[in-house]
């Protein structure tokens, strides 16, 4: 949907003062993620300020400037901001305004260049990857603007390494949803990589969930390579069942080291640094850390997840919008409750098992649910089930092997 905004300009020497701007709210924007909150008003203000600074009186006709405003999205189709397309005396120009962790910035301003999104259709979405990198989304698929061809999974992975993403999702509180299932019969397939797997949680680090996930990974393999976490006893057997120990001082020391190796900051840890930092940590121990993607064409391949776990390789889940689920089973009443907490932000969890639930319902229909058993990285709950098909955006997922 395109909307037109008008501003009136009054000359003050070489600075333009845009006095008013019509704020037109979008009733609907296809593809907008539920958690994304980008202020139209703040984007307009940023555009006004930018035009004030950059333009002279001679650049505009009369006392006004008119722009066409279009929403832009990141690679995961989260609302990122707006592109403003305007006309000046010497031709067309555009400005891209985005929300960056609650701050509104002019990411790109070209007063004398045609908008890269001028050929994006009304039913399509403008996708901004980074400066000078533009695409469009057609029915949820990322496509080249000129050719209309969908980009490959390999190209998508390359683009997202340096892409700009919406970063304000932590402002929204979690949602709590309970799904009641009344069934006639059900079948369950379940697997765990140990009777009790590592459930280490944060150690006071800022934006350190990736380092905690790395801690759970090395904690798992510490059972086989005791020097991965020096002085820490990985776990013990009870009969044929292996039970991992909880975190101790030595575990937190290892997580802090991983945080440094991953170049952690208050802004978080990138995917590439998560992988390279974990590999660096293992290299110092004389070990190798391998990552094998369990994604296919940008989607999680659940069969690959199961195969990875059956081959003793836990799965690192890099998420942006996710859920944790408590499966409550009241078999005597033929009722199961799926109690979800839905989160809106980036997080890394580690999967150590899976569960498939298939329900035959009284009306003859069948419902199925696919879960991954995860170490959440939190103190409470420290473990849960993650529904791979409910309120989630799985950015990347890797089977991890340390050897």
Image (cartoon, rainbow, N blue to C red):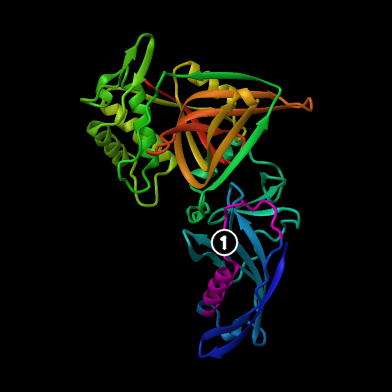
Image-based side of 363 in relation to 175, left or right: right
> Can residue 391 be seen?
no
Judged from the image, the secondary structure of the residue bearing numbered disc 1 is: loop
Q: Position of residue 1 (x, y in %)?
A: 73, 61
Q: Closer to the camera, 283 or 336?
A: 336
Location of mark 1 (residue): 38
Image-based side of 343 in relation to 364, left or right: left
- 61 drawn magenta: no
Image-based side of 103 in relation to 63, left or right: left
> Can residue 394 be seen?
yes
Residue found at the far front of this picture: 332
- Graded by Cα atoms within 10 Å as few (under 14), some (14 to 19) or many (20 or more), the crowding at tag 1 reads many
**Circle count:** 1
Residue found at the far left of this picture: 231
Residue found at the far top of this picture: 239
Q: Which residues are the magenta region?
A: 28-52
Q: Measured along the vertical axis of the image, is residue 317 above or below residue 52?
A: above
Q: Measured along the vertical axis of the image, is residue 332 above or below residue 254?
A: above
Residue drawn at point x = 68 percent, y = 49 percent: 137
Q: Closer to the camera, 321 or 280?
A: 321
Q: Position of residue 403 (x, y in %)?
A: 35, 19
- 36 drawn magenta: yes
Q: Measured along the vertical axis of the image, is residue 145 above or below residue 332?
A: below
Question: Which image quadrant is residue 16 in?
Answer: bottom right
Q: Position of residue 211 (x, y in %)?
A: 35, 38
């Amino acid at each position: 949907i395109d909307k037109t905004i008008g501003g009136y300009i009054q000359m003050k020497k070489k600075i333009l003062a845009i006095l008013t701007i019509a704020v037109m709210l979008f009733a609907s924007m296809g593809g907008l993620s539920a958690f994304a909150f980008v202020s139209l008003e703040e984007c307009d203000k940023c555009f006004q300020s930018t035009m004030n600074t950059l333009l002279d009186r001679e650049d505009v006709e009369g006392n006004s400037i008119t722009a066409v405003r279009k929403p832009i999205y990141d690679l995961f189709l989260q609302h990122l901001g707006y592109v403003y397309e305007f006309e000046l005396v010497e031709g067309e120009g555009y400005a891209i305004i985005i929300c960056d962790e609650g701050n509104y910035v002019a990411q790109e301003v070209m007063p004398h260049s045609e908008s890269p999104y001028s050929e994006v259709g009304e039913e399509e979405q403008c996708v901004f990857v980074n400066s000078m990198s533009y695409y469009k989304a057609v029915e949820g698929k990322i496509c080249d603007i000129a050719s209309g061809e969908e980009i490959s999974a390999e190209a998508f992975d390359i683009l997202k390494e340096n892409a700009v993403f919406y970063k304000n999702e932590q402002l929204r509180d979690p949602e709590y949803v309970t799904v009641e299932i009344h069934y006639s019969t059900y079948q369950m397939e379940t697997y765990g990589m140990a009777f009790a797997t590592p459930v280490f949680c944060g150690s006071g680090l800022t934006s350190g969930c990736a380092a905690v996930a790395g801690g759970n990974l090395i904690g798992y393999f510490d059972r086989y390579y005791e020097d991965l976490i020096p002085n820490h006893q990985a776990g013990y057997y009870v009969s044929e069942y292996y039970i991992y120990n909880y975190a101790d001082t030595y575990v937190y020391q290892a997580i802090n080291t991983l945080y440094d190796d991953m170049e952690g900051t208050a802004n978080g840890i990138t995917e590439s640094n998560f992988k390279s930092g974990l590999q660096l940590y293992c290299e110092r121990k004389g070990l190798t850390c391998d990552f094998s993607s369990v994604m296919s064409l940008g989607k999680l391949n659940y069969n690959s997840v199961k195969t990875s776990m059956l081959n003793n390789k836990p799965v690192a889940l890099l998420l942006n919008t996710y859920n944790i689920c408590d499966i409550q089973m009241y078999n005597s009443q033929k009722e199961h409750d799926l109690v979800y907490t839905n989160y809106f932000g980036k997080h890394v969890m580690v999967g150590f098992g899976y569960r498939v639930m298939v329900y035959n319902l009284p009306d003859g229909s069948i419902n199925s649910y696919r879960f991954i058993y995860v170490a959440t990285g939190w103190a409470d709950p420290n473990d849960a089930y993650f529904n791979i098909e409910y309120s989630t955006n799985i950015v990347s997922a890797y089977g991890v092997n340390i050897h």
